[in-house]
Image (cartoon, coloured by chain):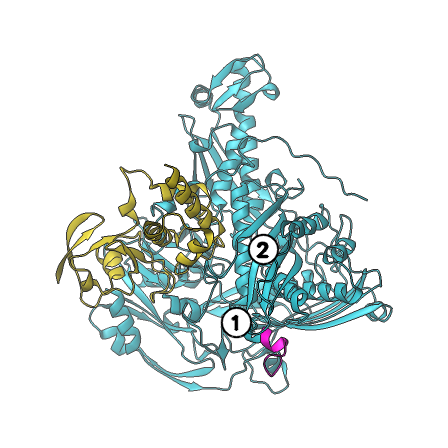
Chain colours: A cyan, B yellow
Amino acid sequence: MADVVAAPEALRVVGRAVPRHDARDKAVAATAYAADWALPGMLHAAVLRSPYPSARIVKLDTARAAAMPGVAVVLTARDVPRNTLATDVPGQTATVGPLRATLHVLAEDRVRHQGEPVALVAAETLELARAAVEAIDVAYERTPGVFTPEAALAPGAPQVHAAGNLLAQWRIARGDVAAALAGAAVVVEGEYTTQLVDAAYLEPESGVAWIDSDGVITIRVSTQVIEHFRDVAEVLRVPQNRVRVIGTYLGGGFGGKEDVTVEVYLGLLALKTGRPVKMVWTRQESLLARAKRHPYRMRYRTGATAAGEILGQQIELLGDAGAYAYLSALVLLYSTVTAAGPYRVPSVEVQARVAYTNNPPTSAMRGFGGMQTVFAYESQMDRVARALGMDAVEIRRINALRRGDRLPVGQVIETHVALPELCERVWAALEPPTPPRAPHVRVGLGLACNLQPYGRIVWLHDWSSAWVGFEMDGSLVVRCGVPDVGGGQASSLCQIAAEVLGVSLERVSVHIADSALTPLAGTTTASRQLYMSGNAVLKASRELREQLLRVAETMLGAEAATLAMTGDLVHAPDGRTLALPDLLRECARAGVPRGHLAVYNAPAGEPVDLATGSGKVFPDYTYGAHAAEVEVDTETGVVRVLRYAAAHDVGRAINPQSVEGQIQGGAVQGLGYGCMEEVLVEDGINLTTSFATYLIPTAADVPDVEPVIVESGEGLGPFNARGIGEPPIGPPAAAVANAIADATGARLTRLPITAERVARALGRLDGTN
Amino acid sequence: MIARMVLNGRSRQVDVRPEHTLLETLRDTLGIFDVKEGCGEGVCGACTVLLDGRPVSSCLVLAPAVRGRAVTTLRGLERDGGLHPLQEAFVRHGAVQCGFCTPGMLLTALAFLEREPRPDREAIRAALEGNLCRCTGYTKIVDAVEAYARDRGHG
């Protein structure tokens, strides 16, 4: 039974692979990133951080540092008007209770992880600021820590926080899993381990703050969330309208600039000194201090019929939150909801927990909990197929979700699921197979699929707003609070406005990410900006168009519904045209606004009890299928990815070049996760705080990624687009693991898949993989 | 100390602090922000400049060592206010996302193409190994460099 989708409407600007305006600026280095900013009389700031993962602060004396010539101020927790940042997490279960995720701006009496901020300094030069940090007299008394989630949840474990080490827990129980597994022709069991990784954007955390002439504390910062102006105001105890955050074009974010980074420190230091202040973290500081991706341990039992239909899945997830809650409860929720993959599984049980430890904190990173589980559920799928002698595409085709099916959490899938087509397309892209280049080299193919939500959880009642308006000369202005992390967020909005209002792309200017001057658009996270702000711009543009055409109707003597806007003109059906400046002058004369503000509200709902739930958790999902061809050197264990293809149904590609960029870039980040990257932590001490030790893929480590764009015409975004920011990072680790199994029969269950682990799995080294 | 250097084609007297790196002199003393700092230890390539035509990590070069030498940053590629054809290729092929690696990537690629005018994709990848990019996955960067080399060859 084919699921029929509509043919896309013909469009003029949307759907074209136009080069982005910001790409040109960046290619000539005209873009001023957060650190490329200086003001007269500017101070430089530095942070004192804990060297220990668990300790009491027994002495903290700043007198000597503060007395140094050139030091403007030294701040500790006592100097912070409100030292706690807090976020409520709705929908948490009774076991843990209502969760309020809190974080101290500066440590009070205890430090809970290495790198925790203890004091701030602002001084005339960066060298002086660093010297003053060294001169702060601080003494710690080390206390017992806990360094794995298993140890954290064991009886008698040292408590990271007074309320206990279990931070959050989610549970899904749908159908009778025990019966399903008992009745299955094949049951596959697997345990999977994923590692701690870093977002590792090229641009470290940075910003400049100043008190503007109107007294407003203004912070120009690299952030995915300009709405943190409210957090800064809370900490400073000033009204929210006295803080302004200007978001710069980011040098990458990937979730790592979703929580606050430097903005609260900058606000404090500017307020205390009255002078402009700059803070730029070093790479080492960034790798030490920033929240990372949760390591998980996952246990899966999957049962299927002899024909390959999945009957049931029993899933246990355990994540490491590190020392503070940040967004861990929500990350775990994403994992819980997506744990069974993009498949129809009648009986599912998920037990998911995340625990505090004294490790580096973990929070948002591209994929946001929808990531770790892909490695597990797609490895399981591959194992089931191999156990039954089935083809990788066939087993996924049989089990793929379809419109009308329910996820384990009970949410009904309301849009088309193109999974079978995606699988066939990537599988075909890797034909014909590469012959092995030596007798000890084996070549294999692996397939992996995923689903990733786009848009925020429905009970967060998400919205975005945008203003679109004409200048008198017919040039167009878009104002929208969206931070651009490099994915083309701003330029896509220009395409949408240009499409609706019939102006050429060159005639559009876009102003973004200013909490005082642009309508707020929410966070650039959760693959939501094209969906949310794209819809806000679409709505504003359409309503503005109607407004203007009512005036044109009188001028042209033809009904508004018959008028077209293209080529910077309004066209009447009889061939007459009206130039935009003439129309706009008439609007000004008649008092008709030439601009329009619109708010887009996402579908909203109340929190569901997952365990018994049949409610909606996310607005919709984006689906993908990736295929990898790898060669395995059976003597050394070295794995090389020879070819790679990645397909996603994006509903409608607003800018195919940007979509391809997201797919290719996400796939390579995913290959880094699968094969290379690991933050090594020993008893809470981070051993990989430089790019010489924390390795991300170089151009020579990865192959070309062949992007396959499928446009089903079904999505909740503008012109039926789906979000594509996060989805492509999900499948690569599983695709590589499945390809290694295809090549050698060895099953790798621990990330990253290093040569050493492969060699062990092949019996070339002693020990386990 | 005052050091004379040729900066983007023009001879300049620069006040150089002996403990500064070339990167610090460019950004902090001269306000030349087209050079980016990504790691401060010569791994990421974001701070790449051309020193007498050869790509170097400016975070690893002590500023006084540049006395009497020629330094080219990305701005030095401008041609009558227009884009260099390699910059155009980067824009056209979607090789720029966040753009933070772009200045260093362009300079490394240009210096490489001086040595090897008609490289294959594998050679391009090897040449760019010292310039990290976290956004693009490199495919479109290789596309841009390859297209520029090909078009220039025909031109």
Q: CA distance from mark 2 to mark 1?
A: 37 Å
Q: Secondary structure at mark 1?
A: loop
Q: Quadrant of residue A712?
A: top right
Give the mark nearest the N terminus, 2 or 1: 1
- Give the camera-side residue of A12 and A216: A12
Q: Position of residue A426 (x, y in %)?
A: 65, 51
> Magenta stretch?
A758-768
Q: Position of residue A334 (x, y in %)?
A: 64, 61
Residue displayed at 68% across by 70% down: A745
Residue displayed at 56% across by 56% down: A667
Question: Where, quadrant-wise, is the C terminus of chain B in this rendering?
Answer: top left
- Give the camera-side residue of A170 and A748: A748
Residue A613 as seen in the image, left or right of residue A456: right
Residue displayed at 12% across by 63% down: B1
Residue ID for mark 1: A324
Amino acid bearing label 2: Tyr
Residue A183 as seen in the image, left or right of residue A129: right
Say the numbered circle drawn on residue A644: 2
Residue A724 visible in image: no
Kindly indicate whether the residues beneath marks 2 and 1 are on one polypeptide chain. yes
Decide whether residue A764 is among the magenta residues: yes
